[in-house]
């Protein structure tokens, strides 16, 4: 049998083999590297893979470790963990609940707004969902909210950190797409391509993130009008109203100033994402100190959590590098290119296929698993077909957000299930998220039809 054909068959089997191993619950990084090495050995035995190709792994690892852009990742993680530890989320939720709670659907709207604010200041999906589940869900149940609407709003709002900057997923995608786009353009003879940066991707994701916030809010308002019993108003005492102004100032002003400092510096081009991440980390420390929650024990906890999360993500990158090299050198990239170019509809057909693939993988895989497996083998081909790297990155970001929401394996659903009372069934959580998954699809369609939603702001702001 032709060794080229053998290599392509092994590449396909390796792709599905890794998915199967991940579904069995094995650690992501070791599954990616281990399964790839096993198939590499099989390929070597069958004459379809040269082990010397793996010699480039060391250079990739060193390149990742010295990549200045990726320094933003641990800094933003530190900022998010510090803000969570200083109880910013709790104070925001309580204050916003009192501000909007007297309106029908007000508690739901407050959860959405707080989710957006936390996304722009922490970006930690799991912690946000758990915090809002612990604080908002009991209040919504006491107010008489439909459990399906309450759980759906919390799960959807908690995942906004996936697309609203600063998002660690966008940082990695921006770095990956920048390198891939440069290579593709050079291969096409364009030796001075327009660079794509993480800041561009942050700016591109800003409007789609706000669109999602708007869609979620409109749905809650729709429920308040058409089904008032599902989201009744909350009774606010006269004493609570009296202190509301001061509480709003204390709860909202510090995180808003931090968001403006971090995102504003990026969007205006004053600072790079890495530089703004350092500003955010220092700002989070100051906020914790002002609230009297900064001590040695708290700092140790935040630093250990940051190290743990950062290590987990970067180990996945290292494992994904082994997979990428093995898949490419066995001819998998050629097979994928032939597949995408042969699909009906040309470029549009290829984009739809890749988005559907990521959407389906979101049922069973985590976001980082998807981007480190699928992006390296599909993005270069789409970029070679003249797809905008900026638009592609934002489109993938919105699509991957559904991986946290889509039953039966949406991680956001699991986070909420872990803190929700036993009176709320898993079925109610699954049913509650379905309308919000539909809203995600609507946002993707809008972004697909109107690419300017992702490309206008970076061109208008960062190109100056």
Image (cartoon, grey):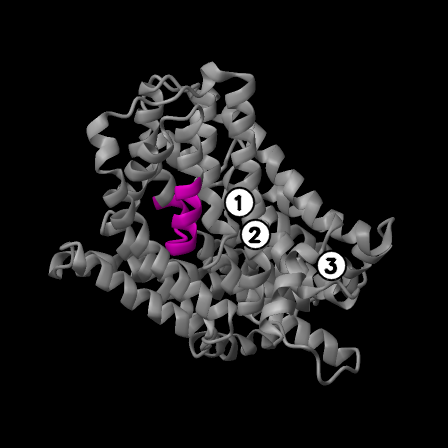
Q: Are marks 3 and 2 in contact (CB under 8 Å)?
A: no
Mark 1 or mark 3: which comes first in sequence?
3
Please report the bounds of the magenta region as a residue range.
113-127
Please tell me the numbered disc located at residue 370.
2
Q: Nearer the viewer, residue 258 or 411?
A: 258
Q: Position of residue 205 (x, y in %)?
A: 57, 56
Q: Are marks 2 and 1 in contact (CB under 8 Å)?
A: yes
Q: Quadrant of the N terminus?
A: bottom right
Q: Position of residue 196 (x, y in %)?
A: 62, 72
Whether the magenta-drawn stretch holds residue 124 is answered as yes
Q: Position of residue 299 (x, y in %)?
A: 18, 60
Dot 1 crowding, Cα within 10 Å, few <14, some 14–19, many 20+: many
Up/down of 404 relative to 82, above or below: above
Query: Pointer 1: what residue?
Result: 365
Q: Identify which residue is drawn at 31% across, 33% down.
A: 98
Q: How many angstroms separate mark 1 from mark 3 (CA)?
A: 23 Å
Q: Identify which residue is drawn at 75% across, 62% down.
A: 387
Q: How many angstroms separate mark 3 from mark 2 (CA)?
A: 21 Å
Q: How many angstroms separate mark 2 from mark 1 (CA)?
A: 6 Å
Viewer-side label of 3, 2: 2
* Left or right position of 78 against 406: left
Q: Nearer the viewer, residue 84 or 323?
A: 84
* Left or right position of 349 against 286: right
Mark 3 or mark 2: which comes first in sequence?
3
Q: Identify which residue is drawn at 39% across, 59% down.
A: 259
How many numbered marks, from 0 up? 3
Tell me, yes or no, if residue 18 can be seen here. Answer: no
Q: Quadrant of residue 434?
A: top right
Dot 3: element: helix
């Amino acid at each position: 049998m032709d060794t080229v054909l053998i290599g392509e068959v092994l590449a396909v089997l390796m792709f599905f083999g890794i998915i199967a191993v991940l579904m069995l619950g094995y650690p992501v990084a070791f599954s990616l590297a281990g399964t790839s090495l096993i198939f590499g050995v099989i390929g070597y035995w069958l004459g379809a893979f040269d082990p010397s190709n793996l010699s480039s792994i060391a250079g990739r690892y060193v390149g990742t470790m010295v990549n200045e852009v990726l320094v933003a990742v641990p800094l933003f993680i530190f900022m998010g963990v510090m803000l969570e530890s200083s109880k910013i989320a709790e104070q925001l939720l309580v204050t916003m609940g009192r501000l909007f709670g007297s309106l029908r659907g007000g508690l739901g709207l407050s959860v959405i707004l707080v989710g957006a604010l936390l996304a722009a200041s922490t970006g930690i999906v799991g912690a946000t969902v758990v915090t809002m589940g612990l604080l908002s869900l009991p209040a919504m149940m006491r107010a008489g909210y439909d459990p399906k609407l309450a759980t759906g709003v919390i799960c959807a709002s908690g995942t906004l950190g996936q697309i609203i900057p600063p998002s660690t997923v966008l940082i990695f995608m921006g770095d990956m797409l920048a390198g891939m786009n440069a290579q593709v353009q050079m291969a096409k003879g364009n030796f001075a391509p327009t660079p794509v940066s993480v800041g561009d991707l942050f700016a591109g994701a800003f409007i789609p993130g706000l669109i999602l916030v708007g869609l979620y809010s409109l749905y809650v308002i729709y429920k308040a009008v058409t089904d008032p019993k599902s989201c009744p108003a909350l009774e606010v005492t006269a004493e609570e109203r009296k202190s509301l102004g001061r509480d709003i100032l204390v709860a909202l002003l510090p995180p808003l100033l931090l968001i403006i400092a971090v995102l504003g510096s990026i969007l205006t081009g004053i600072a790079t994402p890495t530089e703004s991440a350092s500003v955010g980390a220092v700002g989070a420390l100051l906020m914790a100190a002002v609230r009297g929650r900064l001590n040695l024990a708290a700092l140790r906890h935040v630093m250990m959590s940051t190290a743990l999360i950062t290590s987990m993500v970067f180990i996945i990158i290292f494992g994904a590098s082994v997979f990428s090299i093995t898949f490419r050198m066995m001819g998998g990239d050629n097979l994928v290119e032939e597949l995408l170019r042969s699909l009906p509809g040309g470029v549009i057909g290829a984009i739809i296929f890749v988005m559907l693939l990521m959407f389906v993988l979101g049922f069973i895989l985590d976001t980082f698993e998807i981007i480190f497996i699928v992006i390296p083998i599909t993005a270069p081909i789409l970029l070679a077909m003249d797809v905008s790297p900026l638009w592609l990155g934002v489109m993938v970001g919105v699509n991957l957000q559904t991986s946290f929401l889509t039953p039966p394996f949406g991680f956001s659903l699991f986070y909420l299930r872990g803190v929700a009372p036993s009176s709320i069934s898993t079925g109610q959580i699954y049913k509650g998220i379905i309308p919000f998954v539909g809203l995600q699809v609507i946002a993707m369609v809008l972004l697909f039809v109107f690419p300017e939603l992702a490309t206008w702001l970076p061109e208008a702001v960062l190109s100056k």
